[in-house]
């Protein structure tokens, strides 16, 4: 026997169906108990594994948030530093025994990495003078003197 209850809530209305467990006769109740299998005998449903496929072209799939975008189909681009380009190091300033080279501050004897046009380069600050700095590029052990730009 089924009972239908109409419930109105704050968010909206919905229809709920409730099935009564009481059987109309004792014979039906006994048959229902015999047909019900114990919980331990029931087989657990197999949960499927998620499979994600990155589309190679628009026919295979699209980005749901940006359907006209070509970004998912573009090949992976890796920016590689120029190997035969000369390294550009700029002495930005000198103050109180510190020198700024390509935006990074060094004291005498300090080592560190700076960003250059040829990628990150490791260098050591050898000597800080009044208007120039002597540095050593590592691991090549190439020494350079960086001078302040005129007019600064």
Image (cartoon, helix red, strand yellow):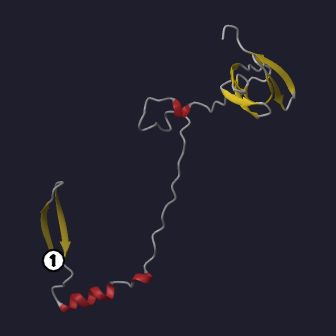
Q: Residue furthest top?
A: 151
Rendering quarter of residue 97: top right
At 71% from the left and 19% from the top, the residue drawn is 90
Image location (x, y in percent) of residue 140: 86, 29
Q: Which of 118 and 145 is in front in this view?
A: 145
At 66% from the left and 11% from the top, the residue drawn is 152
Specify whether 135 is left or right of 52: right
Image location (x, y in percent) of residue 132: 77, 18
Specify whether 55 is left or right of 136: left
Screen quadrant of the N terminus: bottom left
Q: Nearer the viewer, residue 2 or 126?
A: 126
Establish if 54 lies above or below 25: above
At 18% from the left and 78% from the top, the residue drawn is 20
Q: Which of 70 and 105 is in front in this view?
A: 105
Specify whether 111 is left or right of 115: right
Rendering quarter of residue 9: bottom left
At 74% from the left and 20% from the top, the residue drawn is 89
Image location (x, y in percent) of residue 147: 76, 15
Q: Name the residue under label 1.
A: 1
Establish if 95 lies above or below 58: above
* Secondary structure beneath label 1: loop
């Amino acid at each position: 026997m089924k009972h239908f209850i109409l419930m109105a809530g704050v968010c909206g209305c919905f229809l709920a169906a409730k099935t009564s467990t009481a059987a109309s006769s004792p014979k039906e109740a006994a048959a229902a108990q015999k047909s019900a299998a114990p919980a331990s005998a029931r087989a657990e449903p197999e949960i499927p594994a998620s499979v994600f496929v990155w589309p190679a072209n628009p026919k295979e799939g699209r980005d749901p948030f940006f359907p006209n975008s070509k970004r998912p189909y573009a090949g992976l681009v890796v920016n590689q530093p120029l190997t035969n380009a000369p390294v550009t190091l700029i002495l930005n300033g000198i103050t109180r025994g510190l020198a700024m080279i390509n935006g990074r501050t060094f004291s005498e004897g300090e080592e560190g990495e700076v960003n250059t046009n040829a990628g990150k380069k490791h260098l050591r600050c050898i000597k800080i003078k009044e208007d120039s700095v002597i540095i050593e590029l590592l691991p090549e052990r190439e020494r350079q003197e960086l001078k302040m730009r005129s007019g600064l």
